[in-house]
Image: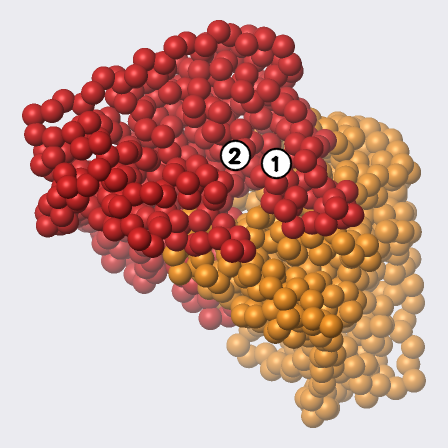
Chain colours: A orange, B red
Amino acid sequence: MSVLGAQAVIGTLLGSGVEVCFANPGTSEMHLVAELTARPEMRHVLCLFEGVASGAADGYGRMAEKPASALLHLGPGLANGLANLHNARRAGTPVVTLVGDHATFLTPFDPPLHSDIETMAAPVSAWVRRATSAAGAGRDTADAITAARSGGVATLVLPADVCWSGGGSPAVAAAPAAPGFDAGAVERAAKALRDDTDCLLFVGGPNMRPAGLRAAARIAAATGARLLGEKSPARHRRDPGVPDIARLPYPIDDAMARLRGHRHIVFAGARPPTAFFAYPGKPADLVPADTETHHLGMSPDALEHLADLVAPGLSAPAAEQTAGTGLPSGELTVAKAAAVVAHLLPEDAIVVDEAMTSSSALVAATAGGARHDWLCLTGGAIGMGMPVATGAAIACPDRTVLTLEADGSAMYTLQALWTQAREGLHAVTVVFNNSSYAILAGELDRVVPDAGRRRAGSFVDISGLDFVALAAGMGVPATRAHTAGDLYAQLSRALAEPGPHLIEAVVPPVTRL
Amino acid sequence: MSVLGAQAVIGTLLGSGVEVCFANPGTSEMHLVAELTARPEMRHVLCLFEGVASGAADGYGRMAEKPASALLHLGPGLANGLANLHNARRAGTPVVTLVGDHATFLTPFDPPLHSDIETMAAPVSAWVRRATSAAGAGRDTADAITAARSGGVATLVLPADVCWSGGGSPAVAAAPAAPGFDAGAVERAAKALRDDTDCLLFVGGPNMRPAGLRAAARIAAATGARLLGEKSPARHRRDPGVPDIARLPYPIDDAMARLRGHRHIVFAGARPPTAFFAYPGKPADLVPADTETHHLGMSPDALEHLADLVAPGLSAPAAEQTAGTGLPSGELTVAKAAAVVAHLLPEDAIVVDEAMTSSSALVAATAGGARHDWLCLTGGAIGMGMPVATGAAIACPDRTVLTLEADGSAMYTLQALWTQAREGLHAVTVVFNNSSYAILAGELDRVVPDAGRRRAGSFVDISGLDFVALAAGMGVPATRAHTAGDLYAQLSRALAEPGPHLIEAVVPPVTRL
């Protein structure tokens, strides 16, 4: 039976298990909206800004391990979603981006909202296509889903008349090929690990889960190799029964120190780390030139195989027991906040970490505590925290989502709070308000002459934000914590109550400049 | 004397009169920030989101008639600024976009924040270049300024090591060629106007100012031609001494009706209008097929010349005197709000109009009142209002800026309020809160079957926003108006006090669906 192009698109999504659509549509997407809302099995989630929709699709995909769709309005709508699609690309998250376009017969006249959508989409997309007919729209959608399932952003441009025309039919998405691995590379890595004690096993991607981390721990126990995790994994599953793994630090000198002094580095599920930013006189490639590297690729099977080669029959060692710290008191600092969060983190929480300069203390404090997933800022494009949390909460409605958010980053996509309120998501956000773009303070310190510090400090000082009022303005109950006791009481309550909450954790401003 | 690349860039900007920089920089821009802040004659304005910076540069350029610069951080920072650069492109606003990139030696390693900046920039830019050396950075900047001065977005990508290296020197930007006009086309238009009474003169761009509108009025008086202004001029200067001009309406049926029935249409400073969106069975090109068109180009001199040909010696007719309406009372509606705004609009105000479905009543009510500039949403990418107002206020510190804002659009770039507060700008925002994406209500009505209306209505309903709290959260004093009297009192006070204010004007929700 022939259906409208829009019906073929939505039917194909549903038939392939893509059952959530994060959307900010406009006039050119009305037929898609009509069909989205006609199918009760499709959950449609309105977002008040496209960066929320694309970030939510990233968070959903990381947790559901299948794509959501993000429905965006023309080139400018896509543009607003690009930064979080950049993060999704770096995370390898499956995302199907549907971009409505003008009808094919209008585009040649270059109407005001026309722009080159495919060109804008290319830098963040593994796959881009423009649908040209209702008859092909189902197949196009199925191909987009297949491309996304390989771990990436697939962008399908849908002209309005393709959607409103008849002659369409839903299609079925093919399963993507499972990633294989190079058995020879694994054997060479095994030889290096056996023959040499100066080895580092650098783990990332799909290995940042119990299976991969157990395999890594077996390898380390059997060979003496050191272990290091990638800096910002898309999803790090932390389980008190599995040895935790330290992650590559952000400051370049610290990162270089961690990678130095190994004859071999074996990369499993991770690319070799680069400098996050460049600095005069410092390298771009953080792997020392005299280190031999081994690349196992992205398949988790490669690391299992390596463990079976070098540690046959050996179980993973027990995780170290971390001594619980006492509850802190007094004026709030990031360290005290980290201790409070570690105390209160519910079992099987999803932690979304965009705490920036406040992050490392939080990561350290929560090791060995309750089982949880930790989702990182993979691509460095700030504004991912609350959107990713929104999508994660929709993917996992029975779990608590805790977003650890920096003040500067929070201001990028604050509109996510409105969606959290409307959808009644159990998402708790702690904003670390240090009134600063703290990450810039140290960088500016190094390049600004003394005389210019006061003026340059104007780029670091972002005081004047009241996150309690901002959250209230979007219907999210919020409180402010000045002391560790405040935070304990407020976070306890927020975690216990249904729906979203926000806590502004007031921490000392950064005063270096 | 050789200076750092960053110093060559900033020195070139200042030497060419580009003395404002709207910025959200990151680590890769630290040397530019150091130099920006070392030069007191460069006003640097921190924005908490790049869409604010790019929109502010648009607003500044429209009013100052020279470019500001927008300093953005890598591909994702540019991405966040693209939607408002799209509007600037459609406005023909001069804007110099400086995008910091990773150092040249880091880029080949594809670090997390790397993306293809030039490709992202292309769809919105008239000119794109990547600086490759400190020695060339001054020249590159000068060329960007020259390109922007021709009326467009010029994007210069500045790798970090180009900025931190020595060997640079400031350059001087060339003046762009003034746009000429085709005297033959003007003469043919004059003949049509003389010979035929069924003529429409369609005016836009630089002719939406007193000189152009007087010339148009002279032509109409002499020839009987009808007059129509483009739908969304970048800047419409309205003066009580100059006949006002009606603008092309948004609804396609109304627009078609206005353009129908003319043997000739003469376009002066405007392109022929297209449908804003396409609809099944309706045309893309709104100019009827049997109408002969004449194109005078973008130079205001063409329209002057035409007036001198067909109306030599004739003065522009006097503007119609509009009868002042009484002050409304009772529960607020858009029509009553428009009357209040018309009563209170200060002399020489700058009105930024992103009121969407509330806009036409406001335009009509303010005709014939105090002299003002009216700035429109040129490219249809919502989120321009408060950013453009921010830039306009910085360009014109002695004038009052009044932003007429829709609730949905306000949520796109609300962060502009923080910059308005920090900079102490006299910018007053009236948000028309109808709790709806009202513009979608009518569109959905036409495509959604009755049974689906309730669910589809979830895409129209954006209730739950408290703009008073949101403004307070960014340090902007705010009040809520439920009645015409409330609005009169609150707007009077806001206009009289220094600094920014926001008024949430509560108007009836759209209930069609």
**Neighbour class for label 1 at 10 Å: few (<14), some, many (≥20)?**
many
Instruction: Report the amino acid beneath label 2.
Output: Met
User: What chain does mark 2 sit on?
Assistant: B
| Tag 2–tag 1 contact (CB < 8 Å) | yes
x and y percent of residue B289 in the render?
34, 54
Q: Residue drawn 41% across and 40% down?
A: B257
Mark 2 vs 1, N-terminal side = 2
Seen in the image, is B112 located left or right of residue A181?
left
Q: Is residue A6 in view?
A: yes
Of B510 and B350, which appears nearest the observer?
A: B510
Quarter of the figure that contains the N terminus of chain A = bottom right
* Location of mark 1 (residue): B438
Where on the picture, by quarter, is residue B311?
Answer: top left
Task: Residue at 81%, 73% (x, y): give it.
Answer: A212
> Which residue is label 2 attached to?
B356
User: For numbered disc 2, what is the local secondary structure?
Assistant: helix
